[in-house]
Amino acid sequence: MVILISKMNQKIADFVNILKKQGKLFYLCVVLFLIFVIHPFFDKTPFEELLLNIITTVILASAVYALGYNKKRLIWSICLGLPWLLSAWFDFFSPLDISLVSHSFGVLFYLYVIILLLRHIINANTITVDEIYGGIAIYLLIGMAFGVIYTVIYTVDSHSFNASFSDTNYRVGDWSDFLYFSYTTLTTLGYGDIIPLNTIAKSMVNLEAIIGVLYIAIMIARLIGIHTTNHKR
């Protein structure tokens, strides 16, 4: 028994050491993937809104940590992320509905993080594993950003989206609905079960689909370009 416990402790220590060796973008990527694993278990439950705020907090913390290599960018990310975090929790505890304000701050924060990570990868002279994690994180963040954008559009105009389900009483509007819709659009999968109706919603859907295609093409071209340059050296 003592030997078994000793081996388990050693394996845990080895795992912790592996995690310590990972770059900052690794943790952001892991957090984003965990959201897809955890969220379905709380969807349409009384705990969903609480989980959404916890997700907001964790994403913000991991993104700020990932951008912590530059003091100026760290300060800006905190300045943009803190209003999002505070408004999200205020909306959760307060009877006042300020979800539009919270989501708007969320969009700004997502866009800022995406732009900085893109600049970081594009300006890199060599591609490490951390840059690859960053590229994956950017793709996932784009999907989340558009999910929040669709939520904002729906909050302003409740007739901007409709669901073509067999259940005629079902109406879209939940964050999870728009997150799902965002990734089916980003990957150009497009099941057609959620439909944009007004001009702004249609334009955003078209924009996301274009970004989804171009991002993959440009990122692969960039990775190949850097690899070829380093190989010639």
Image: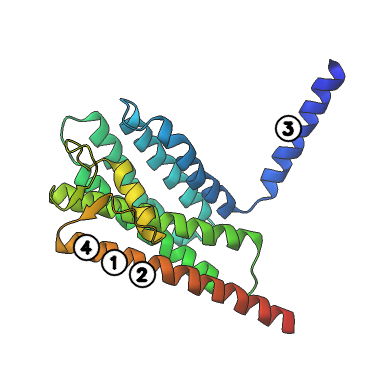
Identify residue for label 1.
206
Q: Nearer the viewer, residue 87 or 49?
A: 49
Identify residue for label 4.
202
Mark 3 or mark 4, which is nearer to you? 4
Identify residue for label 2.
210
Q: Are marks 1 and 3 in contact (CB under 8 Å)?
A: no
Q: Are marks 1 and 2 in contact (CB under 8 Å)?
A: yes
Q: Position of residue 63 (x, y in %)?
A: 47, 51
Residue 183 sits in which quadrant? Answer: bottom left
Name the kind of residue labelled 3 in the image: Ile
Query: In 3D space, how far apart are the residues under numbered discs 1 and 2 (Cα atoms)?
Result: 6 Å
Q: Which mark is residue 12?
A: 3
Residue at left offset 22%, top offset 43% = 172
Q: Position of residue 231 (x, y in %)?
A: 73, 79
Mark 3 or mark 2, which is nearer to you? 2
Q: Which residue is the extreme one toward the right?
A: 3
